[in-house]
Image (cartoon, helix red, strand yellow):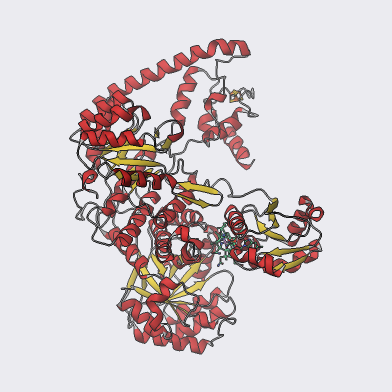
Amino acid sequence: MAVTAMDVYRLLPKTNCAKCGEASCMAFATKLSEKEIDLELCTQLAADEMDKLVDLLAPAVNEITIGKGDKAILVGGDEVLYRYELTYYNPTPLVIDISDDIDEAAFDERVKKIEDTQFERTGELLTLDAIALRNKSGNASKFKEAAEKLKNSSLALVLCSFDADAMKAALESVGDEHPLIYGATENNIEQMASLALEYDCPIALFVPNDLEKMKELSRTLRNKGITDIVLDPGTYVDAGIGDTLDDFVMIRRLAIEERDEDFRFPILGIPALTWLNSDEDEVNTAIKEATIAATLINKYADMMIIHGTEIWELIPVLTLRQSLYTDPRKPQAVDAGVYEFGEANEDSPVALTTNFALTYYTVEGDLKSGKANCYLLVLDTEGRAVDVSVAGSQFNGKAVADLIKDTGIEDKVKARKMVIPGLGAPVSGEIEDDSGWEVVVGPRDSSALADFLREKV
Amino acid sequence: MDKMTQLLKLLENTDTIELNEFRMDFEELELNIMPAIQQVVQTAQRQAQQAEIVREAILAEEFKPPIHDYPGEVAEVQLGAGTRKPVFLGGQKTLYRFEEPQPNPPVVTFDVFDIPMPGLPRPIREHFEDVMEHPGDWAKKAVKDFGANMVTIHLIGTGPKVMDKTPQQAAADIEEVLQAVDVPLVIGGSGDPQKDPVVLEAAAAAAEDERCLLASANLDLDYRKVAKAAVDYNHAVLSWAITDINMQKTLNKYLMKEGLTQKDIVMDPTTCALGYGIEFSIDVITRTRLAALKGDSDLQMPMSSGTTNAWGSREAWMKKDEWGPTDYRGPIWEIVTGLTMMLCGVDIFMMLHPQSVKMLREIGETFTKEYMTSEVPDISNWVTQLE
Ligand code: B12
Ligand code: SF4
């Protein structure tokens, strides 16, 4: 259950001294409960209360760092089962695997591809987060060598081997990079736990489809004082996906609703297993892997290892991650106002759109790739798309007339003429009446806007 | 601001507020004392940790699956009767399979149109090019070649701006499809609020006693007429609200006033596609299903998803070399959109692409199986076995 502001308030000094920068202890408590401010900012706390607050504010799911410095990624940290209750924290890192037995050129090429993969959406650059090195060779020195090479990579590292000797060899060269050790199993847990302690690295526990055993082994690790644990209950991709979903959901429920200490850790899903003995061709296997990834990220995977690197496979997964992790408490909006594209001057055309982030960035992308020279007026529709705000009437004549005044666009251009989105057609007359500008209804999709401005305006 | 007032109200009702004895008033004092406090804090934390370790070692508890008790359940809706093989939707008593498997698997209904639909994306046209002239053939192919559980016949041609087909022509198209296949039908209008109720009424009469799903009733049209057609000719109604749980509740209430019961209604809370507001749909659908299980009788109907919306997304259709072939992007967009809705509780999916349908069904089928009863491969050595 999420912590309420009241729970927090009880433990604050209640003096309203405002040293934290907030007007009152209650305001501070509200922000703390929503994780929008740091506890340390209240300098007035007694030790006892501090302790209680640290405990109270610890996320239901432990937040773990993998990698260090620029490469560091955060995993876990969630508080709720459903995003509408608060928000989800720390977008699921996508980790791509690489095996230690491929030749050097292929190895370098794959690493480069992983590092270079990117997809821009609503002004955000979506990228991959880490590399999982697999000890496919079964050979310790090969594993160590490959790990050494990955030191130069810009991404965080997961070391995958169930052989403690190989793990030790790799840690000798990259242990100080804070990689995730994958993984401890029933058979090697003592040795792997010692390595995690020796190198102070987070460790993943791999116990396929047996939560009873997982609980026992998680406790074994915790009894050794290890707190940075990641849980992998196994990923099955065919009929077994039902079990995998059940396992993931049970772990998360136990963490959040029952605060079961053995399960308060991030969950690792491995869609890459789709490629294990797949009898489908590459395209179908990649489509299936994306499906499995989407399934797991929807139901609590805090981190995933993926095998496919085709951009068309990754785009939907990156997009789903972005959507799931947007904060429902904040509208996805850009600032209203006037934006300039290319070389705009007093003869340039003026177009109008809304301040919904997806709408704005779609239009922006189209204007840029279409090499348009123009002004774009962005209307504050409280972060709503064109047709949504037409339906909800945030997109109306008076609002556009005000926008024209506020932006001073009339000082920038000579003509009094604007292109509005095709979907805004129902309010074109209203805009003309309220602003005195001439309105041209543009195409429905902004991909045709740059050409439209060139040819028709 | 709202939140603050609420909190202050809360505060009024609390009778005990512990007061802190410890307070520092001078900046200097703070500076001197802070490190000491920190030390105390750290020691306390360490002690707490050690204490915990001792306690843990003694009290190893057993694993217990976190199963909930739900006061409510989802109604079971039958689609298809008369000459149709029936399909059942809903009936869930729990949220997840480990609590109790759901009685009916999610169902896919293939989109078929009463006109050749030149605008359909190429990856779909490819599969149906040869049958698009005749809705009956189209439906047959969906069922025979692609294993559709159901077929949705969209009477797009009745749209005043499309072909303005008459309600009688619509009824004839329905008859053609009824003859061609024996699966249950969803009957959809053109989206014109004036004409849809009349068209649906004629279609409902043509399919009397076949228990089709009339799509749809919403607050912008004469939903009474649609409800009445369903009651008169023995059909169910799709109750469509736009990502708004209160609107959904209101509409369901109105429909039940017209003589429909929970067993005659399927809800469409609106599917916003992946990347186009899917998070709004996730929230609304999750909340709707939770409300049903908590016992809200106005929301205990099965849910439907217009998954086909996914094809409207740029990432699904727009040619762009850096994004790879649309042949793959389109189906994945549809799969991920539908799948996400399925994981939030949706029971029936309107879809277009054969491969998306196959993938969704594979995962949906597992929802009716008991936990740990499926055969699973040995993955214990995946690190070395993966190519
Ligand atoms: C997500 C969504 C929502 C979300 C809002 C998300 C948001 N932040 O806007 C929520 C759930 C909140 C919502 C609410 C409502 N919605 Co709504 N919603 C949608 C949905 C599914 C997608 C909208 C979207 O994200 N589009 C993507 C963006 C990028 O598109 P866009 O802004 O239009 O931009 C494109 C074009 O307009 C053009 N373009 C943009 N700028 C410019 C500029 C120029 C110059 C040019 C030429 C072109 C251009 O190019 C862009 C890229 O293609 C649509 C259905 C659909 N379209 O698929 C319904 C839809 C828009 N909603 C609808 C309705 C009715 C509503 C509500 C009124 C429902 C209600 N009664 O409460 C409310 C209104 C809320 C309000 N305004 O107060 C209807 C509108 C019907 C109509 N036209 O009258 C739609 C079409 C659904 C439907 N079929 O009925 N909705
Ligand atoms: S610094 Fe602490 S005591 Fe002072 S107002 Fe902020 S929360 Fe209250």
Residue B216 % position (x, y):
50, 73
Q: In this view of the protein, which residue sits in the foreground, B355 or B178?
A: B355
Image side of residue A190 versus residue A429, left or right: left
The quarter of the picture where residue A195 lies is top left
The quadrant where ligand 1 appears is bottom right
The outermost residue toward the front is: A105
Q: Is residue B158 above or below residue A378?
A: below
Residue at 28%, 27% in the rendered image: A172
User: Is any atom of residue A378 visible in this view?
Assistant: yes
Q: Nearer the viewer, residue A18 or B77?
A: A18
* Residue B209 visible to an observer of this rendering: no
In which quadrant will I find the N terminus of chain B?
top right
B278 relative position to A251: left or right: right
The residue at 64%/60% (across/down) is A389
Q: Residue at coordinates 59% horizontally, 10% vertically from top-left?
A: B29
Residue A457: image location, x then y, percent: 72, 67
Residue at position x 43%, y 35% in the image:
A71
